[in-house]
Image (cartoon, rainbow, N blue to C red):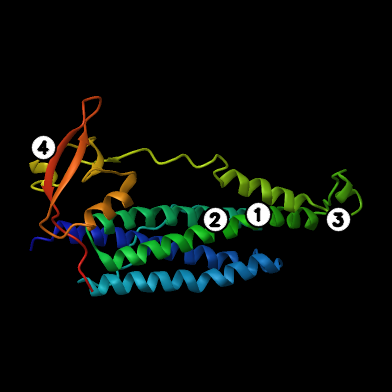
Amino acid sequence: MTVDPRLRTIRRGVVELIGFEAEIARKLEQAQQPASGHADALAAIQRLRPMVQTHRDQLASYLEHSGGAEPTGEMAIPLPTRRPASALSAVLRDLSLAFHHSALSYAMLYEVALRLYELRLREIALHHMKAHADAARSTARLLPGAVTWQLAQDGLHCTCTCPMCAVGACGCVDWGTEAMLAAWQDLAPAEPEPPGFLLLPPRPESELARAGVQGGDLILAVDGQPIRGRQELQDALRKRSLGDEVRLLIRRGSQSAREIVIRHAGDYPKS
């Protein structure tokens, strides 16, 4: 029996994420013992465990209702593993990396769901991606405090000579947390979106393909209205009814812009 390539691609991505969620669940289980003496870390781990299980259940349910069953352990693709870390800071580091890895994998799955127009999976992938990105950040935030806690367990207390630390009001954890979070933030001012919308190769037999438009061409305007980015292009097209003619201003590389006429061909189903 021939398997639909679209369904096979979607299912492959879902199976992979089920494996990732299962591996993170295992890491969270193993992390409880190293975190047992650190209230904040233990609370974070206990908060994240049901979230990960819910994610796995939702993916398995999606897989079942899309024409299959939850994959077996042999089918699931786990995160790369190594010997479990014993120090709390190393445990938190590995957890943060695992959540980062899964968040990026959900970003990939989200793009598959967008491209192949799988609405339910798009919603699941976006929600899970945001949750894993937040989990990666929240576990990373605990790292400076965990390092300090471990040092104190070894009898290594603050020797900083700043005015705060010198009087016993240690600011090193706050300082370290601030520096770490700043490293992940985009501190440069946001650049204005460039004019136009850069095209990927158009779908075969689409309006743009029949008009000779190619990947790398730039849509500069719709019906004489300049556009910047995807949302403005989407909004401009939706001002027309299906079948209406739409005038697009197209530029290829350094060539002069040219106008083409296409027809508004599709939209999301109206609920």
Q: Position of residue 262 (x, y in %)?
A: 12, 47
Q: In the figure, 11 relative to 147: above or below? A: below
Dot 4 alpha-carbon crowd within 10 angstroms: few under 14, some 14 to 19, many 20 or more? few
Identify the residue under disc 3.
169
Which three-letter amino acid code belongs to the residue tagged 3? Answer: Ala
Identify the residue under disc 4.
212
Nearer to us: label 3 or label 2: 3
Residue found farthest to the front: 224
Which three-letter amino acid code belongs to the residue tagged 2? Answer: Ser
Q: Secondary structure at mark 3?
A: loop
Dot 1 alpha-carbon crowd within 10 angstroms: few under 14, some 14 to 19, many 20 or more? many
The residues tagged by marks 3 and 4 sit, at their Cα atoms, a distance apart of 69 Å
Dots 2, 4 in contact, CB < 8 A: no
Identify the residue under disc 2.
96
Dots 3, 4 in contact, CB < 8 A: no
Q: Position of residue 70 (x, y in %)?
A: 29, 71
Q: Position of residue 218 (x, y in %)?
A: 25, 37
Identify the residue under disc 1.
143
Q: Secondary structure at mark 4?
A: loop
Q: In the figure, 236 relative to 49: above or below? A: above
Instruction: Name the quadrant containing residue 256.
Output: top left
Query: Nearer the N terminus, badge 1 or badge 3?
Result: 1
Dots 1, 3 in contact, CB < 8 A: no
The residues tagged by marks 1 and 4 sit, at their Cα atoms, a distance apart of 54 Å
Dots 2, 1 in contact, CB < 8 A: yes
